[in-house]
Image (cartoon, rainbow, N blue to C red):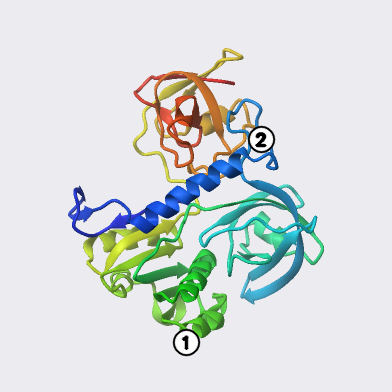
Amino acid sequence: MTNDAVVTAPAHSHLGEVTVTAPGIGLRAIGAASRVYARVVADSSIVTALSPARPRRNVGYEFEAVVDDTIDEAEDVRSLLLSRRDGMPLPTWLPGAHIDITTPSGRVRQYSLAGRPAGRYRISVRKIPSGSASTEIHTLTRGDVLRVRGPRNAFPMAEAEHYLFVAAGIGITPIRSMIERAVQDGARWTLYYHGRSRASLPFVAALQRMALTSHGHVVVKTDDADGLPIPADIVDLGMGTSAMYVCGPAALSSRLRDEALRSTAVREFHTELFTPAAVVDGMPFVLQLDRSGDTVEVGAQETALDALRRSRPDQPYSCRQGFCGACVVGFVGGRVEHRDRVLTETERENSLTLCVSRGAVEGEVLVLDL
């Protein structure tokens, strides 16, 4: 899950044929708050130690949660309402946040938090025929216990004059929390919501009620009745000052991003991806493990994490996109190209994120504190 911002406004740098500015004050403030939050959480004594070799030892709150209730939302979509097993308040969160869920069988998956950030956590899971974790989650009942880590947010919501939300299928989960916030703030918003069929789309009635009682508008389209989404038509729902938030398949998100770059209807573009982006601009380098003396070669199209896990399959990780900090290790030598969004400049002097950071030049030897 990654957040990609594209701003089309008078600016100082260029992306293709569209000018790009730095994020606005609201986005910068949220980013700063997120970094402060991440540092507080990471250094807290109540979080779980993941690796004795890492300077940043703790990532996120971790606790046991109990299933309070289950709700069938749509065809093959079920929501779980969760509370802490020990009765303590749940960690607070902002729209766009997600949590890591460890199922009773030990499978780990990330799920966006839906609804309002108060009271119990709510996750909504679509059952995938070949998905072992989603199938297991759909068998859970009241009283079952899950391990929860988080929340974390790689999809923060900035202030805007108008929001254009785009959700495809179960991608509505983080978008719903953003809509709840827009309604609370009295902001103008438009939702384009697309799925296979009407029966497969959760929350439609609730979203339409929110639109009727706020400055909102909902457009629902389905493959069986309307055909595939048309990116140009979706982007045209923007109002020039719109911040566009997209959650859905990578192919759709990419097409919408390209269309947003060509349009004046959207000022900002943000998207959340469910899988890490492929390494397309890397160079081979070498990891040297300082304690054991072992070396690991990292290919141009693979991550240091993947290479290291060939010999150390228990090496911790979570997001694989450089924002959670679970795979951070210390390093004692070499030049690093940092690509993360979690470490401070000071921390980057002796730490790196295995999932995205690389050697600064081809053949670089990075000596890790492992």
Left/right of residue 269 with respect to residue 87 in the rendered view? left
Amino acid carrying mark 2 in the image: Leu
Please identify the quadrant where the C terminus is shown: top right
The answer to whether one can see residue 334 in this image is yes
Q: Position of residue 201 (x, y in %)?
A: 54, 75
The label on residue 212 is 1
Seen from the viewer's position, the closer of residues 110 and 301 is 110
Is any part of residue 255 visible from this angle? no
The answer to which of 92 and 75 lies nearer the viewer is: 92
Could you tell me which residue is drawn at 33 percent across and 72 percent down?
234
| Picture residue at 36% right of the left edge, 39% below the top | 280
SS state under label 2: loop
Report helix, strand or loop for mark 1: helix
Q: Amino acid at mark 1?
A: Leu
Q: What's the distance in space between the residues labelled 2 and 1, CA to CA?
A: 47 Å
- Nearer to me, 226 or 29: 29
> Can you tell which quarter of the image residue 255 is in?
bottom left
Is residue 272 depicted above or below 119 in this figure? above
Place of residue 278 in the rendered image (x, y in percent of width and height, measured from the top left): 42, 43
> Mark number for residue 50?
2
Q: Which mark is residue 123?
A: none
Please say if 312 is above or below 321: above
- In terms of sequence position, does the residue under pointer 2 or pointer 1 come before the other? 2
Q: Position of residue 318 (x, y in %)?
A: 58, 43
